[in-house]
Amino acid sequence: DTEVTQTPKHLVMGMTNKKSLKCEQHMGHRAMYWYKQKAKKPPELMFVYSYEKLSINESVPSRFSPECPNSSLLNLHLHALQPEDSALYLCASSRGLAGGLTNEQFFGPGTRLTVL
Amino acid sequence: ELKVEQNPLFLSMQEGKNYTIYCNYSTTSDRLYWYRQDPGKSLESLFVLLSNGAVKQEGRLMASLDTKARLSTLHITAAVHDLSATYFCAVRGNYGQNFVFGPGTRLSVLP
């Protein structure tokens, strides 16, 4: 299995809702990433997990809460979002972060989030 | 702070023509990545360039890396319509800086 899957594909939520995005990979990768991409812009890194531990948090607001329950799964919990958080949320994985690795990232199809 | 620039940001070219997209970055790095993104879709990994002088080719696309100049190029040979997409370069700094994407080059190949 050489794919990263994400669910749901689309999500519409109100500003008071709590929802979660899910990402899964079965490539044995030990690094997983969340990116946010606004229309016609490049992806912006949000979080990086390495061996199920949070390695990088790019000063993301606390209304976004990542979780890595095991090496194959990555969640992004959403609470009290703002309309400007509407974007495509991409998950990616790579073999690891260590210096000897290429760190080539494989991206999932994304979740298109709309906050009303 | 690691910054990545691409040039041009928009490129409209005719089928059969050749062109080059440039990617400059601001700090030391020996890992550069090229991705393709079709409208409304995710990112597809094209090339991983790991060392100075690295050159990789796949079909009509060829990528190269000059770490001393902090420059990578993506050369398109005899463009076809199917190459129309947005192309991003991305860099990870040598000192643990995070992955940073360039702004993207939106390529449109016209018949």
Image (cartoon, grey):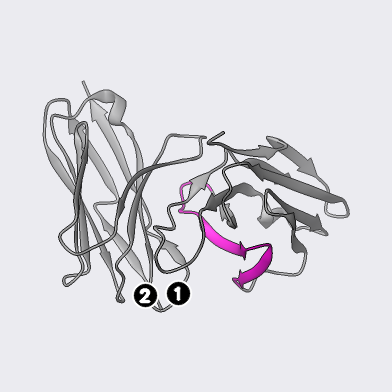
> Can you see residue A116?
no
Q: Which residues are magenta?
A: A39-58
Residue A79 is left or right of residue A22, and the answer is right
Give the percent coordinates (x, y) of residue A19: 83, 49
Front residue of B62/B108: it is B62
Q: Is residue B108 depicted above or below B82 in this figure?
A: below
Look at 43% across and 34% down and name the residue there: B38
Give the percent coordinates (x, y) of residue B16: 12, 26
Q: Secondary structure at mark 1?
A: loop
Residue B99, image quadrant: bottom left
Callout 1 environment at 10 Å: few (<14), some (14 to 19), or many (20+)?
Answer: some
Kindly identify which residue carries mark 1. Answer: B97
Image mark 2: chain: B
Look at 19% across and 32% down and name the residue there: B60
Residue B83 is left or right of residue A56, and the answer is left
Kindly identify which residue carries mark 2. Answer: B94
Front residue of B38/A70: it is A70
Front residue of A84/B74: it is B74
Callout 2 environment at 10 Å: few (<14), some (14 to 19), or many (20+)?
Answer: few
Question: Which residue type does callout 1 highlight?
Answer: Gln
Q: Are marks 1 and 2 in contact (CB under 8 Å)?
A: yes
